[in-house]
Image (cartoon, helix red, strand yellow):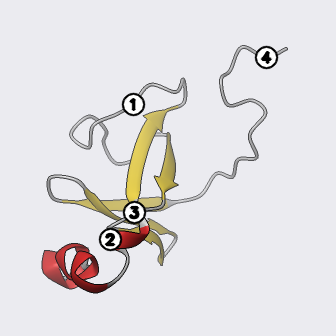
Amino acid sequence: MSSHPFSSWKTQIVTGRLEYKNEILAAFMDSMMIAHVPDLIGVVDVTGMPLQNTRYEQGTEVIVYTVPAPAIWQVGKGRQVFDLKHFGY
């Protein structure tokens, strides 16, 4: 059995871009936005250790994951607070 923590995951190597201010606001695969606030977008290195957005540089191999935001943040006033327009998009 492999000692790599993600050896059983279906993975794909792609060119991506993360845009952030204090937190990651949007994730892009090639030129398509694949995730954005209010969903949580996280980054770990290839060993599974979490990375802060100040700890990786262009060209760093990382694993990006997303966790859907609770429904209350997806509509109405919750959506107004976390809409991309609020962050300048």
Q: Position of residue 82 (x, y in %)?
A: 23, 73
Crowd around label 1: few <14 · some 14–19 · many ≥20 (10 Å): some
Relative to 53, is 66 above or below? below
Q: Is residue 56 left or right of residue 71?
A: left
Q: Which mark is residue 50?
A: 1
Q: Nearer the viewer, mark 2 or mark 3?
A: 2
Relative to 16, is 71 above or below? below
Q: Which residue is mark 3?
A: 39
- Label 4 sits on what residue type? Ser
Q: Are marks 2 and 3 in contact (CB under 8 Å)?
A: no
- Label 1 sits on what residue type? Pro
Q: Are marks 4 and 1 in contact (CB under 8 Å)?
A: no
Q: Which mark is residue 5?
A: none
Q: Residue at x 35, y 71 (%)?
A: 72
Q: Which residue is mark 4?
A: 2
Q: Nearer the viewer, mark 3 or mark 4?
A: 3
Q: Residue at x 25, y 79 (%)?
A: 84
Q: Which quarter of the rendered picture does the N terminus lie within?
A: top right
Q: CA distance from mark 3 to mark 4?
A: 31 Å
Helix, strand or loop at label 4? It is: loop
Crowd around label 2: few <14 · some 14–19 · many ≥20 (10 Å): some
Q: CA distance from mark 4 to mark 2?
A: 39 Å
Mark 4 and mark 1 lie on one chain; the one further toward the N terminus is: 4
Q: Which residue is mark 2?
A: 73
From where the camera sits, is residue 59 visible? Answer: no
Q: Is residue 32 left or right of residue 40?
A: right
Q: CA distance from mark 4 to mark 1?
A: 20 Å
Q: CA distance from mark 1 to mark 3?
A: 17 Å
Q: Are marks 3 and 4 in contact (CB under 8 Å)?
A: no
